[in-house]
Image (tube, rainbow, N blue to C red):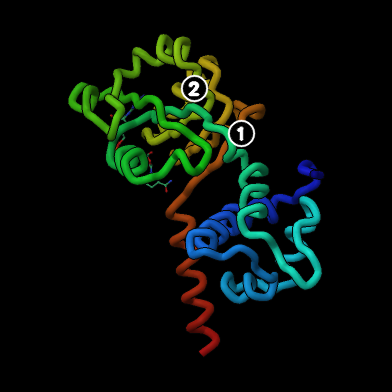
Amino acid sequence: MAKNAISNSVIRRLPRYYRFLGDLEANGYVRISSRELSEKMGLTASQIRQDFNCFGEFGQQGYGYNVSELRRQIGMILGLDKQTPMILIGAGNLGTAIATHLDFHNRGFELIGAFDVNPDIVGKHLGDITVLDISELESFCHEKKPTAAILCIPKQAAENEADRLVKCGIQAFWNFTHYDLKIAHSDVVVENVHLGDSLTTLSYGLNSMEKNK
Ligand code: NAI
């Protein structure tokens, strides 16, 4: 499988394919054609064929795709066959919502710890996890070896904490702060999430629709 050759735009579509294929599998689908999948996903059949061709020959002329096999292969490309230990930094409003509402397990991660500076938050339970004081970060990482972190702290605190986390062995950041981690740490993997940007894109869509009326 030519994993390195897969373009970023294809990679961005993989989680959606994975989710759709999971729903199909749960609904008893054994196989599906690119045309049927395209109708369900609002993509063109040729786009789907092109995307899937990037990582191997899955489809069979006249047969379509084997749903569970395709989902398994996409899951492997996305690294979902492993469980990466992850920690949460900042257990405030956003951090709590993320820690308690997301299914980490099915997305290739296991949330094993949470940290905060606020004594009123330290000791709080987030599911099975108890929030620890951030002063315990180094000893925790030394013992449990997490390699991914979710940053849900104020921007001003992010620079300092990111440096600490990298020294503790964190290689991947799910970054909700507005601190640009890549400038100081070009060698780590960063996925920035900005709900505000997504909302702005919605505004753009609405404006363009109104202009075209
Ligand atoms: P919050 O104030 O409820 O939570 C922040 C938590 O971080 C607090 O519990 C605080 O005690 C803790 N904290 C502060 N410094 C810390 C440190 N050095 N180490 C560990 N914990 C520390 O704020 P909220 O609403 O949860 O937002 C968190 C961050 O996420 C902010 O930077 C905010 O701007 C950002 N945010 C980003 C969004 C996005 O779409 N990217 C959406 C909403 C918020």
* Label disc, if present, on residue 181 of the rendered structure: none
In the rendered image, residue 198, in percent from the top left (x then y), is placed at: 48, 58
Furthest-bottom residue in this view: 213
Label 1 – label 2 distance at C-alpha: 14 Å
In this orientation, which residue lies closer to the viewer: 10 or 154? 10
Answer above or below: position of 195 versus 59.
above
Which residue is drawn at the image coordinates 41% and 31% (left, top)? Answer: 111
Q: How many marks?
A: 2
- How many residues crowd around disc 2 within 10 Å: few (fewer than 14), some, or many (20 or more)? many
In the rendered image, residue 186, in percent from the top left (x then y), is placed at: 65, 29
Q: Secondary structure at mark 1?
A: strand
Answer above or below: position of 33 versus 191.
below
Which residue is drawn at the image coordinates 52% and 64% (left, top)? Answer: 28
* Label disc, if present, on residue 189 of the rendered structure: 1
> Mark 2 belongs to which amino acid?
Pro
User: Would residue 62 appear left or right of 69 to someone viewing this image?
Assistant: right
Furthest-left residue in this view: 120
* Circle nearer the viewer, 1 or 2: 2
Answer above or below: position of 37 versus 86.
below
In this orientation, which residue lies closer to the viewer: 208 or 34? 34
Quarter assignment of residue 45: bottom right
| Sequence-earlier tag: 1 or 2 | 2
In the rendered image, residue 98, in percent from the top left (x then y), is placed at: 36, 42
User: Would residue 131 appear left or right of 160 to someone viewing this image?
Assistant: left
> Ligand 1 shows up in which quadrant of the image?
top left
> Mark 1 belongs to which amino acid?
Val
* Label disc, if present, on residue 146 of the rendered structure: 2
In this orientation, which residue lies closer to the viewer: 40 or 161? 40
Q: Secondary structure at mark 2?
A: loop
Q: Quadrant of the N terminus?
A: top right
